[in-house]
């Protein structure tokens, strides 16, 4: 789906948002599986950034949200995200990041949008630090 050809970005959070208690449950699960002392987390397919800032706060890490949709990124950038959150346009199959720069890759509601899952997995591996 090409989100830039629709108006869904404007209403995405209302349809897909979480109540604060539910978001906290998700963040607890994410934190339980995150590498200790993560410096950089990549939120692949971040959309409107609904996890980007909360993950940054919970894990005290820098988060780079990547999404192909300029409209979704515009909504993400309009939110109060803090200094540790950045958004970039790009695809999961060609991440706009350096090799071995990230401690964790995060994806939510993304897999079904990937035309080439193997290429996306290779890109995640390329971007992840060893260990």
Image (cartoon, rainbow, N blue to C red):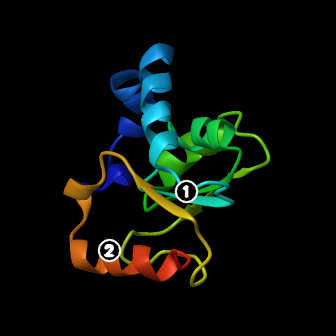
Q: Which mark is residue 90?
A: none
Task: Give residue 111's position: percent from left, percent from top.
Answer: 25, 57
Counting residues from the start of the chain, the first of labels 1 and 2 encountered is 1
Q: Residue 71 appears at what percent x and percent y?
A: 48, 48
Q: Residue at x 67, y 55 (%)?
A: 37
Q: Is residue 123 visible?
A: yes
Task: Return the residue at label 1.
Answer: 35
Question: Circle 2 sits in a helix, a strand or a loop, which is it?
Answer: helix
Image quarter where the N terminus lies is bottom left
Where in the figure is residue 57, as x and y percent of width and height? 68, 37
Decide which of 93, 58 is in the foreground and name it. Answer: 58
Tell me if mark 2 has few (under 14), some (14-19) or many (20+) residues whose alpha carbon lies within 10 angstroms of its own.
few
On screen, residue 5 above or below 131: above
Image-based side of 82 in relation to 48, left or right = right
Task: Answer yes or no: is residue 19 visible.
Answer: no
Residue 9 image position (x, y, % from top left): 42, 39
For the point 57% across and 65% down, the residue is 103
Residue count near mark 1 (Cα–Cα under 10 Å), binned few <14, some 14–19, many ≥20: some
Give the total of numbered labels.
Answer: 2
Mark 1 touches mark 2? (CB < 8 Å): no
The residue that mark 2 highlights is 121
Q: Residue at x 32, y 74 (%)?
A: 121
């Amino acid at each position: 789906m090409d989100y830039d050809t629709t108006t869904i970005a404007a209403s995405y959070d209302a349809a897909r948002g979480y109540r604060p208690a539910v978001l906290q449950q998700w963040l607890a699960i994410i934190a339980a599986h995150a590498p200790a002392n993560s410096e950089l987390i990549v939120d692949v397919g971040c959309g409107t950034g609904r996890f980007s800032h909360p993950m940054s706060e919970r894990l005290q890490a820098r988060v780079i949200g990547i999404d192909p949709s300029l409209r979704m990124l515009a909504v993400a950038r309009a939110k109060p995200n803090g200094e540790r959150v950045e958004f970039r346009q790009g695809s999961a199959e060609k991440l706009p990041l350096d090799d071995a720069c990230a401690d964790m890759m995060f994806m939510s509601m993304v897999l079904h949008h990937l035309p080439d899952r193997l290429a996306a997995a290779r890109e995640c591996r390329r971007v992840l630090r060893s260990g």
